[in-house]
Image (cartoon, coloured by chain):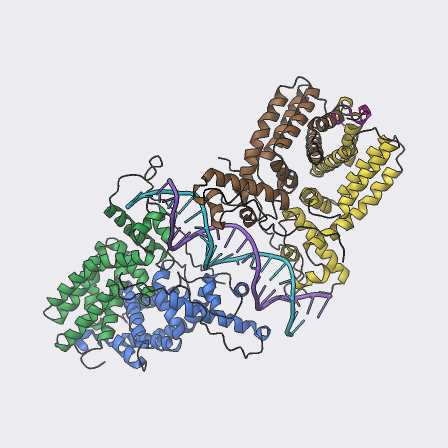
Chain colours: A blue, B green, C yellow, D brown, E purple, F cyan
DNA sequence: AATGAATGAGCGTTCATTCAT
DNA sequence: AATGAATGAACGCTCATTCAT
């Protein structure tokens, strides 16, 4: 029997967070706290199992709530995912937007975009991992969650940049894809290092996009 | 309120091949043909629903085989996925390897890699889509299926290239990530166009990596 | 293949009274008013979904009360049903009783009974429909709610009538059944017409019971 | 606490039929036998709890089958109900139809209808009870299950009879209702007696409809 | 009193998997 | 080999009911 297995360590049984039995009692838990607990648990499980394989019960198992309680907060895993997605994307999108708008030249555009994205990912790692592992699978399945809207927005800004002569006249769709691909992959690797060096990763991506490998000789 | 929904157009019903209700699926089949049929069905379903959301039943529903027959060929969806993954990676990996080995300089390395990958993706689109949509989710979950092995191999070659002075002295892990990210994303966009222009996409990726945006002014 | 479906138009959503979202249902209510509201809602839902398929939540959803409030008034849907049943039967039973007691002959007995029942049904249609649609299902399930007590009372009066020579010497149980069956079915049809003609329906039933079809030639 | 309870002896736990462990083994059970077992169990439970209150699990609990097996035979309780309804009504409807068609006069029409119905009910008591207890509740909910179609057919025949002068010129809808009401109620009482006397019940109903109470003096 | 969030049992249904044919 | 019915675990979800507020 081959050892190479697609792990999928079926259902995470609650080895869970059970947040310390010393707390006052379930009833005092505020609704807000429950909502947060569910979102947190969901982020964990989506990152671990992937959106498609995650079940609502996986999510609640990661909390200390009862099965039915989930439905006081969300109608389905889709809805938690969206909430997660929105709450998170809502935090980056404006920042990225600002960065691009205030860019004076294309160097600024590229550098600002990567740096902002990497800083965000570092600050919200849980959610970045959700996106990292699920955007591919989800792109086909979702109408326009915030994250995809963010991609479209990037592409539009690129088109505008090209039209205004700010960016060179390259294929805007390919450039968008390239930025997204590099951002996710480099970011993923960045987050696995210790210590995490956002500057370094951002510099790598920016240098690559601006001058290509030919321009990169030193330790970037 | 957003009206974006996570579609998840549950279960593809068999619009399938169901060969003729009069002979109840009894037609002469070779073992090899059955195996192929399952793999083909699986590729379709994995691409459509994502690996995580796919069930064994989804796969057999796409064939004209009976439920039990699946288990004569594979133990689980994981195993089909691996087989799919292996059979496919086995087709690209050697080609990519050859390309890199015969590269005289780093321009050749980059150009050859992208072009080969894009050509392959175009020729085996079904499977490319499986990977495209599932690698993110799977990377965490798989021990070392062929595809990941391919990534490692690329990274090793990059390290070698740097050691030999063939490639500039950049972060090899980041560069690997960047190539993978760009390859997948650009490829995805390339395949959505009509007609598909492999040359154009490969040129875009290569130019970007070699000289960066600063060097790209014309329609690449 | 038949395309007849068992509709069961699951759960009536509150198109209800929901008094004004700004004051969250806090409006001044007397205990009596709440009780009435629940009974009214229950009658509506029992008639719509049937007793068996109705849930406590269906009932409270039809009111502007909170879930827990229900239990300040009733222990279960059974109890509401009984209360409904009692309150209603309490309104007809004495009338029917009076009618029968004061009957001088069996023509009076029959005519008076049907007319009184039809008049009542017309005046309390909501509840009539509850009974109409649920007595069959309930007869087996209830110990002696008022409605069944009413049936027994009728049978007893019939027995007495026969004993006294007021009624012909027929099978009293069958006669009771026949009266009940005709009363419900004719009444149901009567209520679906526009305008509702109680006289006509009562005349039909009485004529049938008194002289049979042979005696009925004109438009009854 | 009142003793008058709406019994609803929650869920019949399998005191069941478990058809003798001596039989060869589950696998040899033919599909037909399973289908019959489900239909039989369903008839029992529908009669006991009422259609609305019955759950699919109540039905399978009455069999020795596993939960999932139900769905190899029926999609829902609606479907079992229809199958039950159809299989049963299909047995009476033609008989009733024949009886009416061959009626020479209205005495024959009435006598033949009641007798045939009562004979059928006696021969298929399980299903009669299902109908008896559920038609009221179901009439509103179903499009046209066989049973309701039977009612319509009766009404049409009555209309035809009136048009042809075979039946007196009475309200056809009321007459239909009256026949149905009497048939169900008298039949119900008939089946509770020991011994069951179909002739007697049929004579009662026929005499009532033909000549009314005035004509009924002897022990009918 | 009235509220409505929390609970966990139980529902309808689908699933992976087995195994007699 | 191939079949597909049977199984029972597990899923998504709703329910009756409780109880702190």
Q: Eyeballing the image, is C153 above or below D157?
A: below
**Residue at the far front in the pictured view:** D22
Q: State the image coordinates of residue C136 (x, y, percent, origin top left).
A: 68, 42
Q: Residue at the spot x=39%, y=47% of the render? A: B13
Q: How many marks?
A: 0
A203 horizontally vs A83: left or right: left
User: Image quadrant for the C terminus of chain B?
Assistant: bottom left
- Residue A209 at x, y = what percent? 24, 73
Magenta region, residue range: D208-220
Residue C203 visible, this orientation: yes
Between B25 and A211, the one lying in front of the other is: B25
Residue at the farthest top position: D104
Residue A46 vs residue A202: left or right? right
Instruction: Report whether D140 appears left or right of B179.
Output: right
On screen, residue A74 versus residue C201, left or right, reads: left
Q: For residue C140, what is the image quadrant? A: top right
- Whether B85 is drawn above or below C123: the answer is below
- Asked where in the image residue D166 lies, by quadrant, the reply is top right
| Vertical side of B72 occupied by B115: above or below | below
Q: Please state the horizontal and vertical placement of residue B112, each as a whole percent of the image.
A: 15, 64
Q: Position of residue D186 (x, y in %)?
A: 71, 33
Front residue (pair D179, A168): D179
Q: Is residue D218 above or below residue B136?
A: above
The answer to which image quadrant residue D121 occupies is: top right
Relative to the observer, which residue lies in front, D99 or B188?
Answer: D99
Q: Is residue C180 magenta?
A: no
Residue C23 shows up from this direction: no
Is residue D214 part of the magenta span, yes or no? yes
Q: Nearer the viewer, residue C20 or D69?
A: D69
């Amino acid at each position: 029997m081959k050892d190479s297995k697609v792990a999928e360590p079926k259902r995470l049984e609650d080895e869970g967070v059970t947040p310390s039995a010393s707390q006052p009692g379930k009833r005092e838990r505020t609704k807000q706290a429950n909502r947060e607990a569910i979102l947190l648990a969901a982020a964990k499980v989506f990152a671990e199992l992937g959106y498609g394989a995650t079940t609502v019960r996986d999510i609640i198992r990661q909390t200390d709530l009862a099965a039915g309680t989930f439905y006081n907060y969300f109608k389905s895993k889709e809805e938690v995912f969206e909430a997660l997605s929105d709450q998170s994307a809502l935090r980056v999108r404006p920042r990225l937007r600002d960065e691009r708008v205030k860019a004076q030249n294309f160097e600024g555009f590229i550098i600002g975009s990567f740096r902002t994205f990497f800083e965000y990912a570092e600050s919200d790692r849980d959610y970045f991992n959700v996106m990292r592992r699920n955007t591919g699978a989800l792109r086909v399945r979702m109408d326009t969650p915030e994250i995809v809207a963010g991609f479209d927005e990037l592409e539009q800004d690129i088109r505008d940049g090209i039209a205004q002569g700010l960016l060179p006249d390259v294929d805007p769709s390919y450039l968008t894809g390239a930025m997204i691909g590099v951002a996710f992959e480099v970011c993923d690797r960045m987050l696995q290092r210790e210590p995490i060096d956002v500057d370094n990763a951002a510099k790598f991506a920016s240098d690559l996009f601006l001058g290509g490998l030919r321009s990169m000789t030193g330790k970037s």
